[in-house]
Amino acid sequence: MYNFLIIGAGLYGAVIAHEAIKRGKSVLVVDKRDHIGGNIYTHAVEGINVHQYGAHIFHTSDKSIWDYINSFAEFNNYVNSPIADYHGEIYNLPFNMNTFSKMWGIKTPDEAKAIIEKQRAEITGEPQNLEEQAISLVGWDIYEKLIKGYTEKQWGRSCTELPAFIIRRLPVRFTYDNNYFNDRYQGIPLGGYTAIIERMLKGAEIRLNTDYLGKKVEIDALAEKVVYTGQIDAYFGYKLGELEYRSVRFETEVLDTDNYQGNAVVNYTDRETPFTRIIEHKHFEFGTQPKTVISREYSASWKCGDEPYYPVNDEKNNALYEEYRKLAAQVSKVFFGGRLGEYKYYDMDVTIKSALALASKVLRLGEF
Ligand code: UDP
């Protein structure tokens, strides 16, 4: 009998496992994939750490979380500064004076603000959807060239049907500063993310290639408490209906050149290019290898059997999630957590914070 059974060897599950082991608990971790790490899994190709399930750049403003993750790896000084390619026109991201200057041929913050003010004039009151929010933040031109096509490709629906909060993730600045994040701390772990998860899971028993939901009763019987980090709707056999997710298909290629695009992240913001972005992995670690590895990302609607990446947190799905959450609260000895277990668009720092909160709740409550 294990004290803890953790379903999912991703970041959330690994933090819980680590906290439990630290307090002398026995832990079994089960994952259906053939590797640990969940979606932050990285592996080396041509000496380059490839982010197999999409780029992960660690960033946080919370010093305690930064210290926590740094206790598992040393981080480099990578600063994310993606560029946008709109039909071959190149712009800096996030939306800042470099973007405005290129878009409008202007120089000063006052000039940029005046143009945005004019372009947003028709949006009055609180923005009701992503389109209104975007225009209100940066005006029509930037919405049309850098937001609309990208967002509609990524989410598979019109910007008028998407929640405003998605675009509020991105900074808008009236300085010449291409740092994608406002956070105090940022970087990529030397040696990749998988090594972090390995360290977190030290002392746990790990069973890979194991489909928990197919053998729930049998596997549950092995432990006193369960932390489930998979899809909450799948746990309940989708009995209230399917929550929507966006999936991503990656087309990864090794190229015989040392520098393909000169930047780790290039977003293709027009509607016509079928992929949303190209990641050139070596640039996350300032790689000097003779070859390079790139991944094109194609966004797709999720259907059973695909990998779920992004929860679609609109009103309809959030309401359905709320019903599942109520069901989950009634399942004794099982705790639900993480991006899929809580159906939330979590960044890595928030994932850790949320996992630490659950770990301390479960462990402190004297549940053992
Ligand atoms: N976004 C955009 N244009 C870009 C990059 C992002 O319109 O070039 C919007 C898009 O709606 C996206 C959101 O900003 O869903 C959040 O982007 P972020 O980079 O945070 O997404 P993630 O890294 O989580 O995929």
Image (cartoon, rainbow, N blue to C red):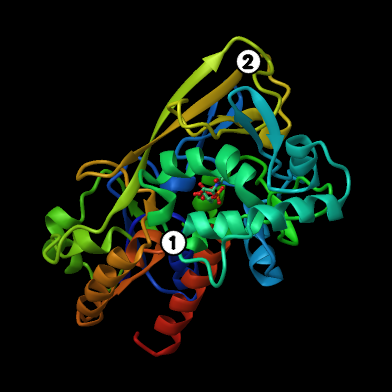
**Toward which corner of the image does residue 81 lie, by quadrant?**
top right
Indicate if the residue with disc 1 has its beta carbon within 8 Å of ligand 1.
no
Q: Residues within 10 Å of mark 1 (few under 14, many from 20)?
A: many
Of the 4 image quadrants, the one containing the C terminus is bottom left
Residue at screen point 85% across, 55% down: 110
Q: Which amino acid does label 2 sit on?
A: Lys
Rendering coords of residue 55 (x, y %) = 54, 41
Instruction: Say what secondary structure mark 2 lies in.
Output: loop
* Direction right: furthest residue: 108
Say which residue label 2 marks: 291
* Direction bottom: furthest residue: 365
Of the 4 image quadrants, the one containing the N terminus is bottom left
CA distance for labels 1 and 2: 40 Å
Q: Is residue 2 visible?
A: no
Q: Is residue 21 visible?
A: yes
Say which residue label 1 marks: 163
Image vertical order of residue 211 relative to residue 13, above or below: above
**Toward which corner of the image does residue 243 lie, by quadrant?**
bottom left
